[in-house]
Image (cartoon, rainbow, N blue to C red):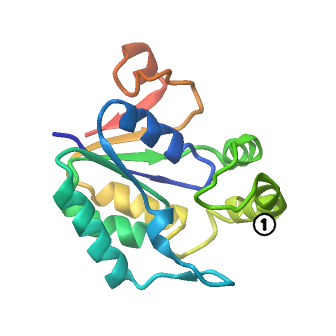
Amino acid sequence: MRKIIVFGNSGSGKSTLAKELRDEGLAHLDLDTLAWLPTNPPERRPIEQAYKQIQAFIRKNDEWVVEGCYADFLELLKPFANEAIFMNLPTELCQNNARNRPWEPHKYESKEAQDNNLPMLLDWIAGYMKRDDSLSYGAHSNLFQGFKGRKTEITSNKKRHNQTLKNDAEKAHILAKG
């Protein structure tokens, strides 16, 4: 049974990969849906509240993929996961992905609102390596290094065409660990 956590910078392709895995039959949880309270400006949801929702999700589903950039939430999932995928793409690729992403209705009320947020998002992506919070490269690297199950680090945007981590030619572009 596959129980996968997927993490990395904003724009790294976490959601795209998780949707491919969902299409293979895994239940999918996007941590963005749990991480923020519905306030203006947005505030982080207390970790205890999110943990209850995470627990309910993993109890309900035998096979799952959980994706997000919240290392603090992912640490809670680590004991239950048997696979970790670190989407460790260069900053420039993450920014290009963010510029080209389709509208995300679960995050923004309209495509226009999403586009208006793009300059802030591009700055956020650019700061990934320098931040020292649970959404940073340092936190993701520590999470990956401390994971005991199967580990895969993806460092490119190469299209997977629903052959996620199965095709040997694709694996040549992926640094598999563990």
Callout 1: helix, strand or loop? Answer: helix
Residue visible at 35% across and 64% down in the picture: 74
Q: Residue sitting at 37 percent across and 15 percent down?
A: 168
Nearest the eye: 136 or 27 = 27
Residue position marked by numbered label 1 in the rendering: 120
- Left or right relative to 53: residue 116: right
**Residue 153 falls in image quadrant:** top left
Q: Is residue 139 above or below residue 175?
A: below
Image quarter where the C terminus lies is: top left
- Where residue 142 appears, as percent x and y from the top left, is 38, 63
Residue 137 locus on image (x, y percent) = 53, 61
Q: Return the x and y of residue 82 as percentages of the image width and height.
A: 20, 48
Q: Is residue 4 visible?
A: no
Is residue 75 in sight in this rendering?
Answer: yes
Tag 1: amino acid: Met
Residue 124 location in percent, x, y?
70, 65
Q: How many labels does the image show?
A: 1
Which image quarter: residue 171? Answer: top left
Q: What's the residue at 15%, 39% (across, down)?
A: 1
Question: In the drawing, does residue 95 fall left or right of residue 76?
Answer: right
85 to 128, vertically: above or below: above
What crowding class fits label 1: few (fewer than 14 Cα within 10 Å), some (14-19), or many (20 or more)?
few
Horizontal side of 104 relative to 7 (left or right) equals right
